[in-house]
Amino acid sequence: MHSVIPIFFTFDKYFVLGACVAIHSLLEKASRQYRYHLYVVHTGLKEGHKKRLQKVVQSFPNAKLFFKDASSYATAWETFQHKSHFSKEIFYKLTAAEMFPEYDRILFSDVDVVFKNDISESLFLYQDEKFYFAGTYSIVDHNMLPAYEKDFSLEERSIISKYEVSAGYMLINLKMLREDNMQQKLMDCFRQNANRLILPEQDCIALCCAPHIRFLPYEYVVCNHYFKQDFSARPLRPYNPWGGKNTPHTYREMLENTIQLHYPGPNKPWNSPFVHKYNEWLKCCLNARQFGYYLWMQPQFLLQRFKRYSLSRFIRKLKKRLHLS
């Protein structure tokens, strides 16, 4: 019997199109020697959303799609202070140890991505080592560190700088998390620090799980803006987590061997054709036979963007008035 590669995603209705494209690209590039069990953790997807996602997966005989209703965790979410700053989908990344008792390991991926190469090998990394999470380490300097100076101690900033990994793609050691009761520690960290967390799940993972964090090769999360970035203008981190030295060649290799192409930020390729590497995503959208859905969703995406920008404008004006007063 072929080994199973389990991987889960968590998103809301506005990301269903992105999920269809991401999942299709993942399975299109997936090694045929494995079976793939894909899980969608959610609280509000409708039957139409589920059917659309199932139709994408059903075209691949070595894959199955399952849905996990996370309503019971939503109750815990409601007790958190300052929860309006974050989404429930962020919180669910920290509950995997309890949510997937049938597995010792699982992969997680965001869906604002497309996959350029096979991901299966990542499930089997670090077999004989103690770790809780493995993710990619940014190849460029952590440009958000100054934002931590106000509310985080020097020691905490040092841990975040050294151990914070991208939560856009992770290998999660469920067995070790359960053995050490780390899920409770992560949830407590989220609850107690919700008013100061900046990258919520990533901050919690670094602060709670260091030094038992491992690093995936850079190519597992390659942001779209890396392809237009002048790395001579923004220096690379001098050393990578594996002890080697980062060079322009390291950067080029990462771009040439991309496994996951990630579209971070509020603008996504499905709601803005001006996003860098939009054509890459559109090609995957066409391959997944989602172009009609893409067109049909544009009015909703436009309305969503209008609401977001209206809120942002209101907050800016409010801050300006408060400052003046």
Image (spheres, grey):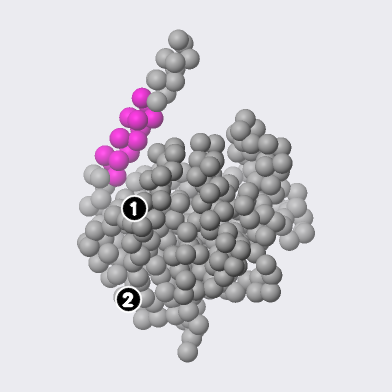
- Magenta-colored stretch includes residue 307: yes
Q: Which mark identifies residue 285?
A: none
Any part of residue 66 in sight: yes
In the displayed structure image, the side of residue 134 where residue 60 appears, left or right? left
Choose between 269 and 9: the one closer to the eye: 9
How many numbered discs sit on the rendered protein? 2
For the point 57% across and 61% down, the residue is: 181
For the point 65% across and 46% down, the residue is: 160
Residue matched to label 2: 59
Q: Quadrant of residue 171?
A: bottom right
For the point 39% across and 55% down, the residue is: 73
For the point 53% across and 42% down, the residue is: 192
- Magenta-colored stretch includes residue 165: no
Q: Is residue 282 above or below residue 194?
A: below
Residue matched to label 1: 12
User: What residue range appears in magenta?
Assistant: 301-314
Question: What secondary structure is the magenta-colored segment mainly?
Answer: helix
In the displayed structure image, the side of residue 152 where residue 5 appears, left or right? left
Choose between 215 and 100: the one closer to the eye: 100
Q: Looking at the image, tell me whether mark 1 or mark 2 is earlier in sequence order.
A: 1
Q: Secondary structure at mark 1?
A: loop
Rounded to the nearest angstrom, the CA distance separating label 1 from label 2 is: 23 Å
Any part of residue 220 in sight: no
Percent x, y of residue 150: 62, 30
Percent x, y of residue 306: 30, 35
Q: Quadrant of residue 113?
A: bottom left
Q: Quadrant of the C terminus?
A: top left
Percent x, y of residue 293: 25, 57
